[in-house]
Image (spheres, helix red, strand yellow):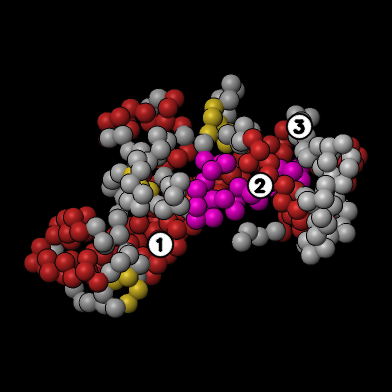
């Protein structure tokens, strides 16, 4: 057996791109979750060709999640799906049905293919290449979506439409930075939020905070990341403040005994807002 290059590449992207992760952390198909048996959430579920086409023409069709090719029944499945591969294979090479049965038996995922001469191997390779291109294009679009969202946010700040208030008394040095340089602070805030969004996209688990979109009154479609509550800010806390390893304080100004300084933090001792800080967040890479 030889691994299919396209199959391996598609598997990597399918695993990392977390738009189709179930709450149980397994991956969704157009039918739902094959692991826990739960039905897919409403923004993922394939509603049938006619209703999907009708939604594409209406205001309900703008959600980015709807462009994920994995939602569609026509998305090339892995070769463990006997009916999918057999129908595809039989269309091109009806005389070699035994090959497809053999593939189903020995291959757990589509990342593998049998080194075999003939059109069966060729058709499998074509299918895997098509699968890779679909998930690759969607992943590129997902990255552009996140990038454009935060470019828009930063432009708003530079045009006087800011308003971020974080973290509010927990880290006096960050509050002092906000007070002294609010525009610089807010730009850094949004770059940190972009880092968080990028890690979530390629985190292999649920795209939780950056999954849904909404249409503003001016017609602009934005990521709905404003109403995520404490879970959003708790996660963002590391990107904004955890990198400094600050001693934590209660809102009353008393030291928080549960938030000790972390001398091993990557920017321990660095001044917030300094060029060292900016260089770090601009060049930070996800895990």
Range shown magenta: 186-211
For this rendering, which residue is in front, 280 or 45? 45
Indicate yes or no whether the magenta region holds residue 2: no
Marks 3 and 2, how far apart at CA: 21 Å
Residue in the picture at 36% in, 49% down: 36
Which label number is shown at residue 239?
none
Q: Is residue 153 above or below residue 10?
A: above
Nearest to N terminus: mark 1 or mark 3? 1
Residue in the picture at 56% in, 46% down: 144
Q: Position of residue 63 (x, y in %)?
A: 47, 34
Which label number is shown at residue 11?
1
Indicate yes or no whether the magenta region holds residue 203: yes
On the rendered image, what quadrant is the C terminus found in?
A: bottom right
Which label number is shown at residue 162?
3
Label 2 Cα neighbours within 10 Å, binned few <14 / some 14-19 / many ≥20: some
Label the magenta part by its dominant secondary structure.
Answer: helix
Which label number is shown at residue 235?
2
Of circles 2 and 1, the one toward us is: 2
> In the picture, residue 6 is in which quadrant?
bottom left
For this rendering, which residue is in front, 36 or 243? 36
Marks 1 and 3, how far apart at CA: 40 Å
């Amino acid at each position: 057996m030889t691994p299919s290059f396209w199959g391996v590449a598609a598997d990597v992207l399918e695993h990392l791109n977390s738009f189709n992760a179930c709450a149980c952390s397994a991956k969704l198909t157009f039918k739902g979750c094959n692991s826990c048996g739960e039905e897919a959430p409403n923004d993922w579920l394939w509603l049938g060709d006619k209703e999907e086409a009708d939604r594409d023409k209406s205001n309900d069709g703008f959600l980015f999640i709807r462009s994920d090719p994995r939602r569609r029944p026509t998305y090339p499945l892995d070769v463990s799906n006997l009916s999918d591969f057999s129908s595809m294979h039989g269309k091109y090479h009806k005389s070699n049905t035994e090959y497809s049965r053999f593939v189903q038996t020995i291959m757990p995922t589509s990342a593998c293919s049998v080194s075999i001469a003939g059109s069966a191997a060729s058709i499998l390779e074509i299918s895997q290449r098509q699968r890779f291109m679909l998930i690759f294009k969607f992943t590129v679009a997902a990255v552009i979506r996140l990038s454009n969202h935060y470019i828009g946010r930063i432009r708003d700040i530079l045009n006087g439409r800011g308003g971020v208030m974080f973290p509010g008394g927990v880290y006096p040095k960050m509050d002092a930075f906000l007070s002294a340089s609010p525009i610089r602070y807010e730009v850094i805030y949004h770059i940190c939020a972009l880092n968080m969004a990028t890690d979530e996209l390629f985190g292999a688990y649920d795209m939780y905070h950056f999954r849904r979109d909404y249409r503003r009154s001016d017609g602009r479609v934005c990521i709905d990341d404003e109403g995520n509550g404490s879970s959003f800010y708790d996660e963002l806390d590391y990107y904004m403040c955890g990198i400094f390893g600050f001693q934590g304080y209660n809102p009353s100004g008393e030291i928080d005994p549960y938030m000790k300084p972390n001398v091993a933090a990557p920017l321990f001792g660095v001044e917030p807002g300094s060029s060292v800080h900016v260089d770090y967040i601009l060049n930070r890479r996800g895990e």
